[in-house]
Amino acid sequence: MRGIFSITRRDNRARCGIINLPQGPVETPVFMPVGTNGTVKALSNEDLEEIGFSIILANTYHLYLRPGTEIIRRAGGLRNFTRWKGNYLTDSGGFQIFSLAPFRKISGDGVQFRSHIDGSSHVLSPEKVVDIQVILGSDIQMPLDLCTPWGIRREEAKKALDLTGQWLVRAHAAWTAAAEQGYGGALFSIVQGNFFKDLRRESVERTLAAETPGIAIGGLSVGEPEDIFREYLGFTASLLPEEKPRYVMGIGSPEYILWAIEEGIDMFDCVLPTRTGRNGHVFTRDGPLVLKKAGHALSFRPIDESCTCRVCRTYSRAYLRHLFKTREILCSILASYHNLFFLNQLVLDSRRAIGENRFKEFKENFLYRYHNGGGEG
């Protein structure tokens, strides 16, 4: 597969670009909403299109277990099944298996685990994970990898890195075979190595040897302090080639997104905006806001007066608090919509700042207000 990425603008390490995918180009930097089960919780495809998303994430592990690959195959792939018109990135399920530590057994062949749904036993090999994502029709697919938590010993991190590297070689072979049969999705390799710089460097060398169209940085935002996240993000990003899209997995707060863009990261995803939205937590330019607090009971202001989303144009904090306190589903819908709109707008503003060679100033001004604006006001 030829290169799928082109850089259109730069501002120091920050950059804008275009990823060419089967369902159309994706402009970067880009935040990808997480649609674990083939849906972004509380939102419709039309909501996502209205906000402006062109790519969302779905979860291989969950879709493999339910509804199962046979149903999705008969539907004609995940896109036909869900009727989402844009691109899909699907993760390998490695992180979900990582979180099922008491119910898994890892070997060179792959991972044996018990379903969190019914306790049934399953085995995922690198080849099977590729095959599942081919059935899904993923526009970007991720290989099986072994994610490790913050604080483990170097020996454990090295073992996980070696397994991830071995699995990548096998996944690449399976992906190549699928491409020869007409599959058009891209495979991204995943950098691991935990929080050991020599292991990170070794993992990068293995991912570069695979020559995949894009590269993901895994094993960050797994419980480490912010300063360690930033250090290892910058270190890892500095080792990656300029010509390939870079994806940091599992980050979704405004701070982490801006730090990632500053280091030349092009793609990121997280459940944070919809999960916190369902719990009544919303983003504002002046910092996070908790809808349930009594101080909002008589506040007829929007969530964020500078936000142009349809939630802020229509509803007050008082009404949204009322919905949350009465456990109305509409609160989850509106708060999730706003949070995703907010992050998408943050990325659009970042692209504009990069194009005008003022990203650093934009980032610093945004974060100063976000941390000092008193979001509860």
Image: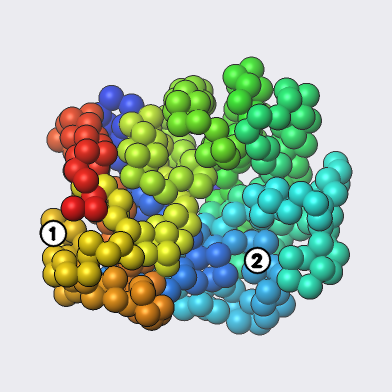
Judge left or right: residue 103 versus residue 368.
Answer: right
Of 178 and 49, which appears nearest the observer?
49
Near mark 1 (Cα within 10 A), the count class, few <14, some 14-19 or many ≥20, is few
Residue 237 position within the rendered picture, expressed as x and y whole percent measured from the top left: 47, 28
Q: CA distance from mark 1 to mark 2?
A: 38 Å
Q: Is residue 233 visible?
A: no
Mark 1 / mark 2, whichever is N-terminal: 2
Circle nearer the viewer, 1 or 2: 1
Q: Which type of secondary structure does the marked residue at label 1 adopt? A: loop
> Residue 179 — which label?
none
Q: Amino acid at mark 2?
A: His
| Residue in view at x 70 percent, y 48 percent | 98
Judge left or right: residue 23 versus residue 318.
Answer: right
The residue most toward the top is 198
Residue 165 position within the rendered picture, expressed as x and y whole percent measured from the top left: 72, 35
Q: Amino acid at mark 1?
A: Glu
| Residue in view at x 17 percent, y 70 percent | 298
Residue 297 position within the rendered picture, expressed as x and y whole percent measured from the top left: 22, 69
Near mark 2 (Cα within 10 A), the count class, few <14, some 14-19 or many ≥20, is some
Judge left or right: residue 76 versus residue 357.
Answer: right
Of 340 and 358, which appears nearest the observer?
340
> Residue 62 — which label?
2
| Residue in view at x 64 percent, y 69 percent | 63
Quarter residue 147 falls in:
top right
Q: Which type of secondary structure does the marked residue at label 2 adopt? A: helix
Q: Which residue is mark 1?
A: 305
Of 168 and 291, which appears nearest the observer?
291
